[in-house]
């Protein structure tokens, strides 16, 4: 097989990958599997955890990695999409991999393409697997991109699989109802291996798939659960026992206790191979960081920023509840930027009452939406949006009238929160300066 192309830098490689396949999204494992086999990739001997679901995946991955790292293990993580820098997606112990490691993986994939082509995400996922193969970590945590059954991450037979939640999103590809989407999400489950489901009442299809494949189902509300305690701590319990007075995770938001319980149930299911002492669990919860998930940042002018990648109705409901739970002293303005294939009317309708001022912002990329089109769709559910231009321009517009005690919420997409982080000087690959996080 002739060698593939070579490019001088990372940006050139990424630009080429975006043009390699005729469709930006094409679910299926055959092409990616053939290419991965031709690379000679070998599955790592360490435990692999696959995390899928509609919302909460990133938080669950971050908490799993943080608790494992606190126990002294070297942890490799793959997540997507990125907020600012592509290298956010592939990390070892929280540190983005080097450009040299990425390019070496890209070259190996390019040399193995043959007559096949890959989508940008598939190229990304295979690169992560090749990087982790050579890095030799103690544990690998992989976040599913879309769905599960036909997602490139599902090429790996995981030692434990997690379905954090099931909601309506990506309906064009996954189906228009929760049962169809649940069936796709549950496609990552494996026979005889733990299958952790982070919702108490998942779609019936998730349970049916677990039973059909013979997975060891651990269902929240039945096999494990959590409860918030008055002093701000929380309690976890499962068949093996109870952990009381656990510290709240450093990730803000009312959904994060449930995500933490799901992550903890996963580690306890793998305790024979990945035992983690209580001290490490607590340290990991206190230290976990994940930009763009109800991320609160204090502005030196006295008001507050809230950044959230919420882009579907379930995530919008969580964001609305978080805003209600943490009220601003003054007024709340919302800057919204969303991709055109999202349920804009559903998301904006849920959040409409949570802000007194709305500003529409552009989103970039082939699935992006210009602010005037977003404002038109928002008007159909009774929300009037000012035209804000780019995310940075919309933020400038919002700050012009903000005073001490006010709050500005920037949400709707990774394509919105990423530029917001850059505008606020929080775009470092280590997640920004924790000192200014609230």
Image: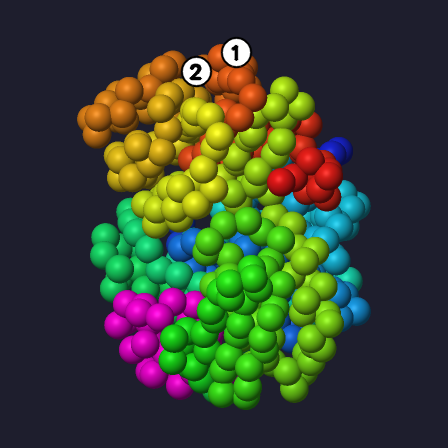
Residue drawn at (53%, 45%) of the image? 293
Residue drawn at (34%, 83%) of the image? 211
Q: How is the image coloured?
A: rainbow
> Which residue sits furthest front?
230
Q: Which of 349 and 75 is in front in this view?
A: 349
* Residue numbers of the magenta segment: 193-215
Residue wearing tag 2? 388
| In the displayed structure image, the side of residue 67 where residue 408 appears, left or right | left
> Which quarter of the figure is the N terminus placed in?
bottom right
Q: Which of 325 and 93 is in front in this view?
A: 325
Q: How many marks?
A: 2
Q: Nearer the viewer, residue 274 or 109?
A: 274
Query: How far across and down, in percent of the image, does residue 100 sit?
Result: 79, 45
Q: Mark 2: which secondary structure? A: loop
Q: Is residue 194 above or below residue 75?
A: below
Q: Which is in the foreground here, disc 2 or disc 1?
A: 1
Residue drawn at (77%, 62%) of the image? 135
Q: Which of 434 and 387 is in front in this view?
A: 434
Residue wearing tag 1? 400
| In the displayed structure image, the side of residue 284 where residue 34 appears, left or right | left
Q: Is residue 296 above or below residue 47?
A: above
> Alpha-carbon neighbours of circle 2 within 10 Å: few (<14), some, or many (≥20)?
many
> Which quarter of the figure is the C terminus placed in?
top right
């Amino acid at each position: 097989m002739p060698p593939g192309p070579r490019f001088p830098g990372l940006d050139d490689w990424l630009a080429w990958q975006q043009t390699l396949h005729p469709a930006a999204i094409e679910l299926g494992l055959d092409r990616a599997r053939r290419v991965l086999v031709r690379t000679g990739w070998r599955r790592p001997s360490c435990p692999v955890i696959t995390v899928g679901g509609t919302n909460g995946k990133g938080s669950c991955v971050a908490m799993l990695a943080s608790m494992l790292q606190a126990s002294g293990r070297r942890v490799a993580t793959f997540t997507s999409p990125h907020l600012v820098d592509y290298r956010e997606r592939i990390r070892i112990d929280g540190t983005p991999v080097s450009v040299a490691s990425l390019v070496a993986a890209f070259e190996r994939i390019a040399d193995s393409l043959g007559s096949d082509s890959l989508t940008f995400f598939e190229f990304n996922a295979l690169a992560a697997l090749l990087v982790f193969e050579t890095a030799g970590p103690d544990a690998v945590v992989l976040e599913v991109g879309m769905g599960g059954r036909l997602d490139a991450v599902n090429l790996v037979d995981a030692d434990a699989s997690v379905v954090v939640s099931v909601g309506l999103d990506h309906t064009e590809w996954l189906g228009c109802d929760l049962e169809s989407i649940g069936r796709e999400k549950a496609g990552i489950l494996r026979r005889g291996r733990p299958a952790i489901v982070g919702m108490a009442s998942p779609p019936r299809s998730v349970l049916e798939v677990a039973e059909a494949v013979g997975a060891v189902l651990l269902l929240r509300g039945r096999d494990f659960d959590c409860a918030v305690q008055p002093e701000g701590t929380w309690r976890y319990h499962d068949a093996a026992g109870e952990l009381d007075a656990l510290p709240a995770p450093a990730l803000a938001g009312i959904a994060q206790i449930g995500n933490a319980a799901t992550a903890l149930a996963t580690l306890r299911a793998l305790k024979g191979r990945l035992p983690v002492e209580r001290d490490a669990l607590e340290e990991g919860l206190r230290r976990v960081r994940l930009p763009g998930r109800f991320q609160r940042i204090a502005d030196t002018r006295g008001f507050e920023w809230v950044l959230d990648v919420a882009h579907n109705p379930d995530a919008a409901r969580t964001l609305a509840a978080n805003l209600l739970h943490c009220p601003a002293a003054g007024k709340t303005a919302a800057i919204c930027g969303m991709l055109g294939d999202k349920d804009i009317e559903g998301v904006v309708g849920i959040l409409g009452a949570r802000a007194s001022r709305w500003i529409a912002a552009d989103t970039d990329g082939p699935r992006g939406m210009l602010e005037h089109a977003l404002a038109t769709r928002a008007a159909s559910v009774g929300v009037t949006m000012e035209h804000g231009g780019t995310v940075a321009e919309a933020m400038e517009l919002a700050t012009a009238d903000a005073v001490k005690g006010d709050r500005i919420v920037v949400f709707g997409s990774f394509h919105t929160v990423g530029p917001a982080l850059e505008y606020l000087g929080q775009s470092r690959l280590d997640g920004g300066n924790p000192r200014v996080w609230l």
